[in-house]
Image (cartoon, grey):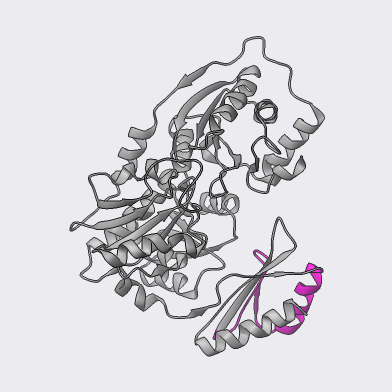
Amino acid sequence: MGSIFKAYDIRGIYGDTLTADLAFQIGRAFATFLKPKKVVLGRDIRPHSEPLFKALAEGITLQGADVIDLGVVSTPMSYYANGKLGADASIIITASHNPAEWNGFKLCREQAIPLSGATGIKDIEKIVLDGSFDPEAATPGVIETYNIVPEYIEHIRQFADLKKPVKIAIDFANAMGIYEAQVLDGLIEFDRLFDTPDGSFPNHEANPLKLDTLEDLQKMIRAGEYDFGVAFDGDADRAGFIDEKGDVVPMDMITALIAESVLKTEKGAAIFYDLRSSWAVKEVIEENGGRPLMSRVGHAFIKQQMRDEDSFFAGELSGHYYFKQNFYTESSSLAVLYVANLVSASDKKLSELIAPIQRYFASGEINSEVEDVNGVFSRLREKYGDGDVIELDGLSVEFADWWFNVRASNTEPLIRLNLEARTREQMLEKRDEVLALIRA
């Protein structure tokens, strides 16, 4: 059973590793661990999110905490509700981009601060395994419904600054972007793809990191006249972008563009980029008067670093875009608005805005299965110890004209490589050299 309690969330196959009975126990354990008075609960459109909600809410209220039922909402909306309603905690029931048979819980304490494996998920697992719940409350908590959607829409829309009309295409993948994109209604003209909510995800997986899921959207853009395209993931906490020609925009380039857009109004803001991002991201932040800061990979780390530095915005190579205005959490609709703001203020197309910041050549993330992770790291340290070594997350080494980062997966025996160089030839040469060491 331990396998469903992950580094960043709880996730399993409904009816198999994740049941309503287990959700009830997790609700009790969550309340035992955090001792909240008021818990915000939201859920995605999977058919089993409803029975999981009922079981979870029953477990939480049994321990005496009240539940605010948001109904069906995107993950960014649930984070907003947590902070805005002054809740002590929140849970969004979703398995994000996982296939239809999966479900799970993303857990937060107050102010939408996430619980990770190290800051609560493992404790909750132990309470469930030991059955060491606090005694049931003499008076159980109550469940009230609350519609946060109008407030979230109004809050995010205030950051729109459109100088001329923008038209985009959106692939909803039958998932929660349908709800998240209500923010854009009436502000931006958009044509829709797969916009019927359907938790069986009949058209394709809701994961913009997988390039094959973007093909329908690319075709739509190439057949029409659009400023850009957007593909939301399953719970709408991530977004992928396509330029006006139908080409995929690397997600770190979007981080750079949003940073440029943000820095027009937030002068000198601190902006985080994850350490897999292109050198160009740091350079664009500096060129626009911002303070670039490098972050670890993983939302729990980034959100904490943003709080520590009072950072306004952070972007991650996986398409998570975090904003201080949403309690230092993701808001994919706000990311869309900032890109739209920039496009609407320029006489250039999106591809032309990106061209000058695609300055380097990246390998993309390459996974290798390895038996001895520590052996890999010692080989790399020995070979590249003369570079500028950064051990923020795995091993990063920077040289004058190329760099790489190597990280071990949290969940499987994999080593992940990201590498970038000034020329394509050098990128290919160094990529193969580092991979040979990893796979030796």
Between 179 and 277, the one lying in front of the other is 179
Question: In this rendering, would 4 be left or right of 55?
Answer: right
Residue at the limit of the structure toward the front, as seen here: 202
Figure check: 100 above or below 246: above
- Residue pictured at 23% horizontal, 57% vertical: 166
Q: Which quarter of the rendering shows the N terminus? A: top right
Q: As displayed, is residue 35 above or below residue 281?
A: above
| Place of residue 415 in the rendered image (x, y in percent of width and height, measured from the top left) | 70, 68
Q: What percent of the width, then of the height, locates residue 328?
A: 48, 47
Q: With 81 as the anchor, is 48 left or right in this view?
A: right
Q: Residue at x 60, y 60 (%)?
A: 296
Residue 325, position as x, y percentages in the image: 40, 46
Segment tinted magenta in the rendering: 372-401
Number of marks in the rendered image: 0
Q: Which residue ends up furthest to the top in the rendered image?
A: 138
As for residue 424 lying within the magenta part, the answer is no
Q: Is residue 419 visible?
A: yes
In the foreground, 43 or 163: 43
Quarter holding the C terminus is bottom right
| Corner quadrant of residue 122 | top right
Q: Residue at x 52, y 39 (%)?
A: 112
Q: Residue at x 74, y 37 (%)?
A: 125
Left or right, residue 80 beside residue 113: left
Residue 400 lies in magenta, yes or no? Answer: yes
Residue 336 x, y percent position in the rendering: 35, 54
336, above or below 2, in the image = below
- Vertical arrangement, residue 2 with respect to residue 69, above or below: below
The answer to whether 119 appears left or right of 186 in the picture is right
- Residue 267 visible? The answer is no
